Amino acid sequence: MIDKIYCAEIKPEMERQRIKLAGWVYRKREIKDKVFIVLRDSSGIIQIVFKEELSKEAYGKARKVGIESSIIAEGVVKPDPRAPGGVEIQGDRIEVISNVEFFPITKDASEEFLLDVRHLHLRSPKVAAIMKVKATLMQAAREWLLQDGWYEVFPPIFLTAAVEGGSTLFKLKYFDKTAYLSQSAQLYLEAAIFGLEKVWSLTPSFRAEKSRTRRHLTEFWHLELEAAWMDLWDIMKVEEELVSYMVQRTLELRRKEVETFRKDLTTLKNAEPPFPRISYDEAIDILQSKGVQIEWGEDMGADEERVLTQEFDRPFFVYGYPKHIKAFYMKIDPEDERKALAADMLAPEGYGEIIGGSQREDSYEKLVQRIIEEGMDPKDYEWYLDLRKYGSVPHSGFGLGVERLVAWVLKLDHIKWATLFPRTPARLYP
Ligand code: NSS
């Protein structure tokens, strides 16, 4: 490790202090006998001025260095109101670690090109800010889960059956058998609650969704919780407390980053429990009153959800969906057999679903019946059905799409910007 400090640590109060920095050349310009280098590291940027009169050698090297070269630089702190951040470095030493003649990303690069060179694009301060916010959201989730007594578990990714419908399964050869990539850890988390009661996991989930939308990836990060002894209303409380903590903590720790993406923080600040709750029936009424062509019993897609989000200035729940548009494992509402005890959490500002959750069917007979109704084979779910034979309990859980949450928090126009290397039907590289 070299003994360096980060760009963001340099303050005007450090006047005349000698410091060492290491990073990449972000911008460069020359004026007469001076070279101005804006150095970038993971914390931010700072301007370093190399004057010929101060060090001929350093000035000469600085002149030759290219954008995105990695360098170690030394110099003295000098407050300067004209410099970004009110401070700059008078550089007198520069060591070029790896010089770059030409960096492929230029100002006018198209979005497609940026994704083609995503491995290089990741160094842009804007992408780094998104990843910092994502990391902070997950740090906050862990803080909350720890203090609320949830156990982290580590479920498998190779599965033998569908969780969220056969049409989006990724199938692969597993020696002489067929396996599928996990769409959700849910069924395995359900098994884990019998020993641990309140469990969570963070795993990649895979969906072969051909639909090209702003909110679908083929591989996304899935934060899932499952708890014994909780009904739908209990788990909705968990959801709103968790999401609220994640958002408020991120505003506390990453305000600057969030503000570079969105000027208006109202909907984020508003994300405090209780979140509004409307029934599916009410949602259909609202949509119909706004001229949307939708009938009771139909699923809401991104377009319908977008219209619905205009009614809210904070995340909200839609509960009580018709059972036939929801998954087989959801418990049927004993008060209305047409409906499942399901609730989605929708983010405002057009974003829509960020969480899908439900109470689970805990009766063996009813679960078998639902599996058959959905055209699936109970044999494929034998172990899962066992859970209803041996000490079945009321239980509930949910899954949060991490990239969807990030996209809303930062008002990104596409979920792909919320992940390091997006995977979509059209993109598997880099
Ligand atoms: O299909 S979900 O609505 N629900 C489940 O998978 C449950 N088995 C989770 C559970 O109860 N443990 O997906 C959950 C969330 C959904 O609300 C989205 O935020 C996200 O997962 N999701 C996605 N994000 C990105 N891309 C795709 N394709 C995607 N599909 C779901």
Image: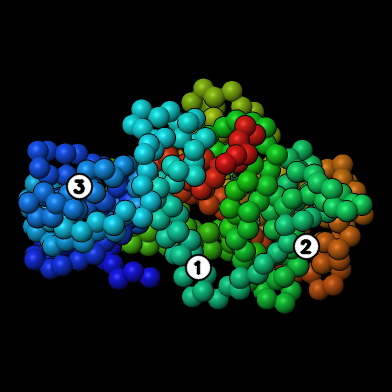
Which of 319/46 is in front? 46
Label 1: few (<14), some or many (≥20) within 10 Å?
A: some
Q: Are marks 3 and 2 in contact (CB under 8 Å)?
A: no
Label 2: few (<14), some or many (≥20) within 10 Å?
A: many
Viewer-side label of 1, 3: 3
Q: Quadrant of the C terminus?
A: top right
Which of 38/409 is in front? 38
Provide residue 410's location: percent of width, then percent of height. Answer: 39, 45
Question: Relative to residue 231, is residue 369 depicted above or below?
Answer: above
Residue receiving disc 2:
362
Amino acid beneath label 3: Gly
Provide residue 197's location: percent of width, then percent of height. Answer: 67, 74
Q: Is mark 1 within 8 Å of ligand 1?
A: no
1 or 3: tag closer to the N-terminus: 3
Residue found 32% across the figure and 42% down from its top:
67
**SS at mark 2 in the image:** loop
Q: Quadrant of residue 236?
A: bottom right
Residue 142 badge: 1
